[in-house]
């Protein structure tokens, strides 16, 4: 056992020698080994845990990121004539401890043992073939002497940690602790989720168990439900790697086919695979048209970790990948071939990432337009909408409006029934809305979380819900917020949902379903969404209708339109014996055309004073308005709302093991 310094912190390098003489180094943070390869996951500076044995001053337990896997019979791979690793792609992964996937790596260190024999694994073949999830975060002992470990997959217990006879077992059970950053709604309430470090999971809906499609970091999920014959599901790994397309037939869907065991190995072929007689799975070639290169290799700016992409609203095989305004890609064959569009060559030196996008929509006459695209990022907004036969994109010159303090775009959205209605959300909760495809903009009250410009005020996603009038829904780290345009003066927090960081929110028009994905608090579905949302909106106190200006009583000394004194109001008896009142107009007496009406005498300095007073009052009111809007505290900014009716809670467990995932449960 020795030490090294990584990122300013002391880190332990453990060298373990197996009975067969294999040298197995572990827990290395970032440095490369002698062959220039990262040790394990190369994330020891982030994933590390340590705990002292409560019964021995010489024993300590440490955890790192993950196991290292090999694909032939030795640690050092043979190389081919080009010097590349000559791995057998069809071989089972090899590991000295018996690991067959990227599971946890933990050791027991005994300082009383002789040098070279101080470290012993406590996983896999040293724990009856068991191991916790990868990426250890924390360890502690229970009062009964059980070693408890927390990692990216949940909470685990190791019995008999001082021996090689104990076992690891999961303790998280049905805790909905999975960090879901992407979700897609399929037919009849089925769900597909991309989860931080526990892969991609799916369920066929209420009453069905979760099954796992892939491991590792689940990517971005999209589903197309308008095809009556096939449910189309797209999924990616981080950086858009491992992009695949699943087509589940209606017959297999009705049978609740478990497709998790039918997905083929990515390395075998890029062709469409028939996983049943009716359902298919495909790893697209991802080729850039005319460039003899894949999208991953050709793009000047690498895809982001969770790279966004879109499936066309009306065509399941049409996709876009909006990376930057220099690297925008469109495919019309499910991702096999991509057309590259350098939309803003003038931004080459400073590539601007696209943060929000829309692909396909209905125009104001209800006509479906597959070519419609909205792209937003930085302070730029672009659209393609003029003709279904053109690839021409236009810069929306009206954005950003001058009144925005922080115009950098976080997301864009359109009315699902009319894409002329466009909403833009900025990074810090400012919102603008257009009813004419971005020709002019209306300012919507800012979401107002914390102090604008700070991390508390960050907002992520926006959608347009087709209520009457339209409503906007925004996600933030504090939950979900709603605002009905032209009806409410501020945003309102939707209660009945967890007070958790919210990754995604969607409204599915085909199924009238509203659903929310959270970090660590499950996924929430609301059927019959429009009715439930409208009920909520109706329960909110509406903005008061502006009252007419107060009517001042006429001054008795002011001259009337005929030059005589005005008559003060007087009471008279009406025909039914009730008392009525006669009033005089409060407008300045001007008299009929050519009449002799006069204004009260006022010197010039009084006029100037009155004007200055009005200006000072307006400025003071403006300062008060900005202070209350941009500097208010979160708890006092929202009125409680009734929660949505008929909500369904889909709890995703933290374990990435298919046999341990929990059932779908209702929220009570």
Image (cartoon, grey):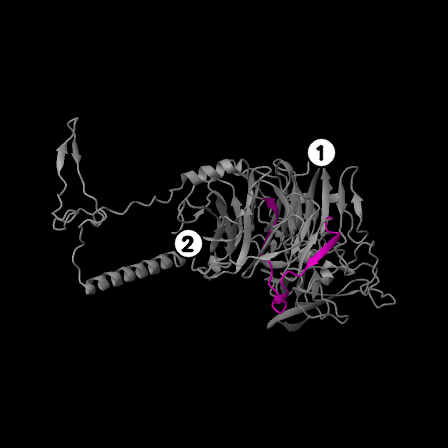
- Of 422 and 582, nearer the camera is 582
Q: Residue furthest front?
A: 594
Looking at the image, residue 92 sits to the left or right of residue 229; the answer is right
* In the rendered image, the vertical position of residue 61 relative to residue 571, given as above or below: below
Q: Which residue is mark 2?
A: 634
Tag 2's secondary structure?
loop
Q: CA distance from mark 1 to mark 2?
A: 47 Å
81 displayed left or right of 114:
right
Q: Is residue 392 magenta?
A: no
Q: Secondary structure at mark 1?
A: loop
| Residue 90 seen by the camera | yes
Quadrant of the rendering where the N terminus is positioned: bottom right
Query: Which residue is at the front of the view, 295 or 524?
Result: 295
| Residue 23: x %, y % from top left | 77, 66
Classify residue 70 by image quadrant. Answer: bottom right
- Magenta part of the protein: which range? 333-362
Label 2 Cα neighbours within 10 Å, binned few <14 / some 14-19 / many ≥20: some
Give coordinates of residue 481: x percent, y percent.
47, 48
Count of numbered circles on the image: 2
Magenta span contains residue 356: yes
Give coordinates of residue 638: x percent, y percent. Answer: 40, 49
Q: Which mark is residue 523?
A: none
Q: Is residue 289 left or right of residue 662?
A: right
Task: Compare marks 1 and 2 and give the one earlier in the sequence.
Answer: 1
Residue 65 coordinates in the image, percent (x, y): 66, 61
User: 493 or 16, which is in the foreground?
Assistant: 493
- Which dot marks residue 255? 1
């Amino acid at each position: 056992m020795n030490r090294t310094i990584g990122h300013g912190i002391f880190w332990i390098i453990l060298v373990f020698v197996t009975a067969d003489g294999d040298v197995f180094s572990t827990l290395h943070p970032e440095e490369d080994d002698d062959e220039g390869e990262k040790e394990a996951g190369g994330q020891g500076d982030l994933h590390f845990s340590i705990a002292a044995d409560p019964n021995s001053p010489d024993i300590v337990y440490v955890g790192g990121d993950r196991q290292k896997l090999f694909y032939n019979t030795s640690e050092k791979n043979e190389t081919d004539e080009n010097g590349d690793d000559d791995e057998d792609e069809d071989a089972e992964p090899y590991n000295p401890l018996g690991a067959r996937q990227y599971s946890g790596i933990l050791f027991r260190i005994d300082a009383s043992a002789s040098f070279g024999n101080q470290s012993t694994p406590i996983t896999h073949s040293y724990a009856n073939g068991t191991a916790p999830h990868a990426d250890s975060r924390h360890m502690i002992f229970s009062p009964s002497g059980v070693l408890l470990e927390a990692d990216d997959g949940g909470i685990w217990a190791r019995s008999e940690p001082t021996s090689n006879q104990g076992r690891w077992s999961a303790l998280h059970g049905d805790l909905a602790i999975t960090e879901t950053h992407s979700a897609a709604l399929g037919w009849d309430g089925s769900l597909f989720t991309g989860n931080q470090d526990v892969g991609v999971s799916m369920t066929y809906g209420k009453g069905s168990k979760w099954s796992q499609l892939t491991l590792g970091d689940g990517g971005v999920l999209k589903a197309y439900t308008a095809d009556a014959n096939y449910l189309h599901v797209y999924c990616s790994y981080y950086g858009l790697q491992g992009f695949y397309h699943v087509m589940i037939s209606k017959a297999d869907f009705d049978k609740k086919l478990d497709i998790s065991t039918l997905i083929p190995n990515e390395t075998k072929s890029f062709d469409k695979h028939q996983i049943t007689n009716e359902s298919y799975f495909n790893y697209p070639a991802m080729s850039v048209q005319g460039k003899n290169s894949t999208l991953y290799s050709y793009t000047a700016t690498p895809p982001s970790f969770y790279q966004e992409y879109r499936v066309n609203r009306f065509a399941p095989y049409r996709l876009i990948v909006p990376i930057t305004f220099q690297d925008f890609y469109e495919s019309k064959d499910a991702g096999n071939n991509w057309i590259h569009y350098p939309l803003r060559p003038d931004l080459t030196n400073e590539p601007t990432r696209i943060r929000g996008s829309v692909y396909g929509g209905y125009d104001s006459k209800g006509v479906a337009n597959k070519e419609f695209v909205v792209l937003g990022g930085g302070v730029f907004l672009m659209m393609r909408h003029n003709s279904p036969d053109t690839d021409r994109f236009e810069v929306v010159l009206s954005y950003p409006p001058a009144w925005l303090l922080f115009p950098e775009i976080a997301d864009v959205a359109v009315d699902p029934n009319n894409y002329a209605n466009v909403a833009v959300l900025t990074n810090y909760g400012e919102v603008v809305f257009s009813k004419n495809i971005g020709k002019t903009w209306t300012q919507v009250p800012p979401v107002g979380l914390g102090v604008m410009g700070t991390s508390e005020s960050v907002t992520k996603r926006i959608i347009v819900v087709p209520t009457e009038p339209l409503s906007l829904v925004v996600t933030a780290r504090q939950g979900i917020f709603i605002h009905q345009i032209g009806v409410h003066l501020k945003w309102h927090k939707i209660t009945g949902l967890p007070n958790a960081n919210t990754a995604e929110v969607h409204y599915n028009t085909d199924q009238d379903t509203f659903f929310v994905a959270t970090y660590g608090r499950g996924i929430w579905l609301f059927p019959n969404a429009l009715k439930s949302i409208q009920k909520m909106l109706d329960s909110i106190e509406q903005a008061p209708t502006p009252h007419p200006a107060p009517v001042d009583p006429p001054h008795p000394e002011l001259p009337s339109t005929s030059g005589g004194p005005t008559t003060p109001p007087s009471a008279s008896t009406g025909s039914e014996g009730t008392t009525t009142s006669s009033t005089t107009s409060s407008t300045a007496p001007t008299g009929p055309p050519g009449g002799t009406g006069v204004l009260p005498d006022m010197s010039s300095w009084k006029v100037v004073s009155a004007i200055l007073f009005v200006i000072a009052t307006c400025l003071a009111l403006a300062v008060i308005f900005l202070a209350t809007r941009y500097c208010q505290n979160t708890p006092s900014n929202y009125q409680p709302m009734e929660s949505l009716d008929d909500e369904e809670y889909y709890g995703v467990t933290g374990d990435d093991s298919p046999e341990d995932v929990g059932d779908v449960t209702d929220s009570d």
